[in-house]
Image (cartoon, rainbow, N blue to C red):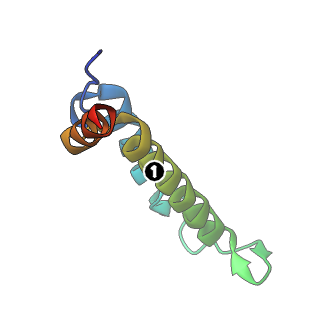
Amino acid sequence: MQQKKEPIKNLKIWIVLIILFILSVPWYLPTRSYEPLILGVPYWAWIILGVSLAISIVLTYILKNCLHMADEDESWEEEENQ
């Protein structure tokens, strides 16, 4: 069985998360810019919501596919032995 690399040691994951967190704060937009309004909400709020959704998707992917849990292996071994 190939052992999975822990996500905390994966540089690609950290780079993606740092970029998403930087994009989540609209400090890079002009001061007092709220035009255009989309459905009555400033465009920068939509940017924040989109980036928040992206962060949630990335973290879900990491937890589901990259995190190696020892308990999961033990439970699979127990099921196979029965």
Question: In this picture, is 43 found above or below 74?
Answer: below
Relative to 50, 36 lies left or right: right
Instruction: Specify the amino acid type for callout 1.
Output: Thr
Q: Position of residue 8 (x, y in %)?
A: 22, 36
Q: Position of residue 18 (x, y in %)?
A: 36, 44
Q: Is residue 35 shown left or right of residue 23? A: right
Q: Residue furthest right?
A: 39
Quarter assignment of residue 62: top left
Q: Residue at x 42, y 49 (%)?
A: 59
How many numbered marks, from 0 up? 1
Given residues 48 and 28, the one toward you in this image is 48
- Front-most of 62 and 32? 62
x and y, in percent, of residue 34 in the image: 66, 75
> Which of the 4 image quadrants contains residue 65?
top left
Seen at 32% across and 39% down, the residue is: 79
As drawn, which residue projects farthest toward the top? Answer: 2
Instruction: Point out the image quarter for the N terminus.
Output: top left
